[in-house]
Amino acid sequence: MLRSLYSGISGLRAEQTMLDVTSNNIANVNTTGFKASSVQFEDALSQTLSAAGLPESYKAGTNPNQVGLGVRVSGISTNLAQGSEQTTGNNLDAMIQGDGFFVAHVGSETLFTRNGSFHWDSQGRLATPDGALVQGWPATSGVVQTGVQPSNITLPQGTTAPAKTTTAARMVGNLPSDAAAGTSVERDITVYAGDGSQKTLAITFTAGAAGSKQWSYSVDDGTGTPTSGVLTTGADPVTGDTNPVVDGITLDLSKLSGYAGDTTVAMAGQNGNKAGALLSVSLGSDGTLSGTFSNGDTIPLARLALAGFTNPQGLEKTGNSELRATLNSGTATLGTAGSPGYGAVVAGALEASNVDLSQEFTNLIIAQRGFQANARIITTSDEILQQLTQLKQ
């Protein structure tokens, strides 16, 4: 039988594979995080008609004479180039800008994906669109420990920010150095106890004798003897008893000024708060999920784990936009967004497919013409065989 028949058949098979891969790329042109594939061909074994000959003194050497036996697919590689950014506005959508993969669990299996379209399920677990559980490091008291094995990211129902005892408060503004003797300025400072209950510190500033440039103050927490002190104005900042301690709270008066004129003294802030209910969750560029609470606190809740591979081309596609580690991909190395080799997380955006339609349509034409040419080989070989069978007629 003619060798050309088998060469043509191998060509048909190879071009069909190219058509299949190209068609799959086009079908996934709008698939989030999809990476296009391409086919590589190589020639098959060649039949040697005569081996190479050594050169002699009376005769030149000869090259081997070989007839090729067709083509085969040597590999199907994945194009890992970055897809374009698609802004969604959803604060749970995440895109990896650079290398790295999100980590997810399906049953007992660990899979990897570039599709960052996440959502919370009914049990408060962060999941991918197909239900795989996103892996990361939960925060304990607002602190994320990343040096341990990641686990499911879970947002418990009724998550609250704990109350925080006030230990420091600060006042700013101006106490006029030219105030009349006995001038009184009263201000209230709201502070919090460890159980979230609030109380008021009443502070009263009283101007001293004319020309003394002094203000005395009294801080009353309503539970005992007020704490008092004296400030000297005419300078910026004021001097004197600038850090009284009232009921365990250090009151910072060192930022007050003492110029003539306006009375603008006011509380600038304090470090305590009442308990707060969770209002929303947002994602940062380092992969940290932070909760915004009704008491004004923003507290880290968890941090996404990212995976890197020595040979990401060796990952196996498992469907659902997920990948599985193989012997040739190497073992996943876990890290955090922003670290070298893991890329950064873009919140509120998804990574589009990196399929180039113009290239894929060109590949369709090439594969189609290649298929037609190989089919022509078979019909031509068939005509030759037909002529051979008719020699006896």
Image (cartoon, rainbow, N blue to C red):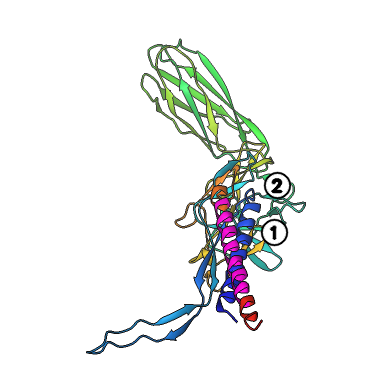
Q: Nearer the viewer, residue 230 or 14?
A: 14
Between marks 1 and 2 in the image, the one whose residue lies nearer the viewer: 1
- Image check: 179 left or right of 158? left
Q: Which residue is mark 1?
A: 132
**Whole-percent x, y for residue 19 in the image:** 62, 60
**Whole-percent x, y for residue 72 in the image:** 55, 72
Within 10 angstroms of label 1, few (less than 14), some, or many (20 or more) residues? Answer: many
Q: Nearer the viewer, residue 84 or 38?
A: 38
Q: What residue lies at 60% left-to-right and 54% top-to-bottom?
A: 34
**Whole-percent x, y for residue 356 in the image:** 55, 49
Q: Secondary structure under badge 1?
A: loop
Q: Is residue 315 above or below residue 137?
A: below
Residue 159 - label: 2
Residue 275 - label: none
Residue 369 lies in the magenta stretch:
yes
**Whole-percent x, y for residue 29 in the image:** 62, 50
Q: Is residue 213 above or below residue 353?
A: above
Magenta stretch?
A: 361-385
* Residue type indicated by callout 1: Ala
Q: Secondary structure under badge 2?
A: loop
Within 10 angstroms of label 2, few (less than 14), some, or many (20 or more) residues? Answer: some
**Which image quadrant: the N terminus?**
bottom right
* Residue type indicated by callout 2: Thr
Q: Residue furthest right?
A: 122
Q: What residue lies at 43% left-to-right and 11% top-to-bottom?
A: 261
Using the rendered image of the protein, determine whether residue 102 is visible from the camera's viewpoint.
no
Q: What residue lies at 52% left-to-right and 15% top-to-bottom?
A: 184
